[in-house]
Image: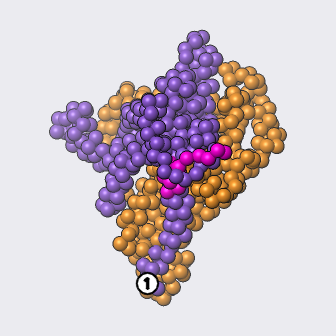
Chain colours: A orange, B purple
Amino acid sequence: MSVEAAPAPAAQSPPRRRVKQFDRPRFLRVFTAVFYLFLFAPIVLVVLFSFNSTRSLQNFEGFSLRWYERFFESESLRDSLIASVEIALITMVVATILGTMLAYGLVRARTRWSGTANVLMLVPLVTPEIVAGASALLLFTQIGLQLSLTTIVLGHITFSISYVTVVVRGRLASLGPEVENAALDLGATRLQTFRLVTLPELWPAILAAGLLVFALSFDDFVMSFFTTGESPQPLPVRIWSAIRFGVTPTINAIGSFMLAVSMLAIGLALLLPRLLGRRESGLGVLIGREGA
Amino acid sequence: MSERRFAASFLLPGGLWLLLLFLVPLGILLAISFGTTDDLGNAIYGWYPENYSRVFDSIYLPVLARSVGFALATVVLCLLIGYPVAYYIAVFGGRWKHVLVALVVLPFFVNYLVRTYAWIAMLGDEGLVNGALDTEIRFLNTPYAVIGGLVYGYLAFMLLPIYAALDRMDPSLIEAGKDLYGSRWQTFRHVTLPHTFQGVLAGTVLVFLPAVGDFVSAQLLGGPDEYMVGNLIQQQFFAAEDWPFGAALTVVMMLFLLVWMIMYLRAAAREAAVA
């Protein structure tokens, strides 16, 4: 990869590649390498020390699972884990359905208000979470709804709908209405067309969006913090209280475990489109780059 | 039923949900911000604009200024770090491009609290860095630590839009710039930067908005001297139990951010119109 090594492969590789190798500023490469180092150092640290056999956060003194045992043996932490998963699952299902319907309506309805609605959709995405959290808390107390897992789910669905809509909308827009029109011409009802033509094309985007929402909800702290009841509280709220009482290695275990769950969801979101035999990558679906 | 009507009916459930659980709560927030508390500390409606004059009290004004300052510093640092890395990935990433982008997104899915906590473990007075260097440098409870935490937390929001803009750009434009005897810097300034300006703008807003409202970084990596408006709001809701004042603070912050939000939304609308 370095400049010195360039002449050797030059014989086989196309000239375009050689130019790029030659032009690659070395400082940029070092900068990028350092960037990734800083990006991952804290995460590697958390995962590594979650397996430490002692309380120390400075020296790794041998492999052990004691902090994971402590996590899973605590009944209240187990309840919190179950609560977090429940919240994320319900949020995923409801937000995905609502968000997908919204995307379909926005792209296909083409009313006078479509442009405005398309932009208003983005408002929940750019609203700071503390604003959404505080106003959700006010709503629930004003209508006399007891704070509980239900209020957390309501809050999570609210901020998740827009993510789904943005992801699915991108896919729908690149689809074009031609195939749907063909189905209608062939005598399918609108509902049949949606179910048999549109939906199958949208599945990769819908699944990716759903798994993204699962991960976002599972990790969410601010909205949960504002809308949570006494107990059980979701894991991030528990981590918050634990950190404020001091640093304990159990947090490393909880954090690593949560990382594994989120990775599973995101990994699936990235892989599923491929597994379903689609050409586009899941990443493209998620960051809305496909068809661009 | 016309096709439009059919499609429009799909808007109903989600639209209604956002109306009732996003817009109405914002209205309640606004109403409560003019309210007061009864003897039990419960929020009641009323007309007490002094909540707002309190926001600009000399006790709270420095906190507001600090929030904006910290958030701006975060934006600048994210830009200085994110742009070169996005450039490297987009131009020199080759077949590793997707992997490199995925690696940027990955830490974003480690819980924000846990990531911040990891910095405490590394930079604390008896943390890893001071242990390894055998020093007693005080990293935590400084403005630098709080800004660093914010940069670490929101960097992906800056990097991804810039990457997307660079990736869309035709690389032969850069080569053309150099063919025309532009130096590296001239090519960057006159060709690359203008082409990716939309990405920079989007990244700036996407980092600035959550950074201003953040309270985790200041609470965990800083101390009361570093508190931001998010910490004030959180205190009013959970410690002081002065919800009307907390609501007023939130409304003021939201109004300030509205300018930025509109700027971003207009750019998004323009992009949608082009697409």
Q: Is residue B218 magenta?
A: no
Viewer-closest of A174 and A253: A253
Q: Secondary structure beneath disc 1?
A: loop
Q: Which residues are magenta?
A: B26-40
The location of residue A24, given as percent across then percent down, is 34, 33
On the question of residue A261 being in view, the answer is: no
Relative to B275, say whether B89 is above or below. above
Identity, as a three-letter code, of the amino acid under mark 1: Ser
Residue in front for this viewpoint, B67 or A49: B67
Question: Residue at 49% of width from left, 61% of height from top?
Answer: A165
Q: Is residue B36 magenta?
A: yes
Q: Which residue is mark 1?
A: B2
Q: Position of residue B63 (x, y in %)?
A: 46, 31
Q: Residue at x 61, y 41 (%)?
A: B241
Residue at horizontal 77%, vertical 38%?
A: A71
Q: How many marks?
A: 1
Q: Is residue A182 above or below residue B86?
A: below
Left or right placement of residue A92 versus residue B11 in this view: right
Question: In the picture, residue A14 is in which quadrant?
Answer: top left
In this rendered view, identify the residue nearer to me: B89 or B136.
B136
Image coords of residue A211 (percent x, y): 60, 55
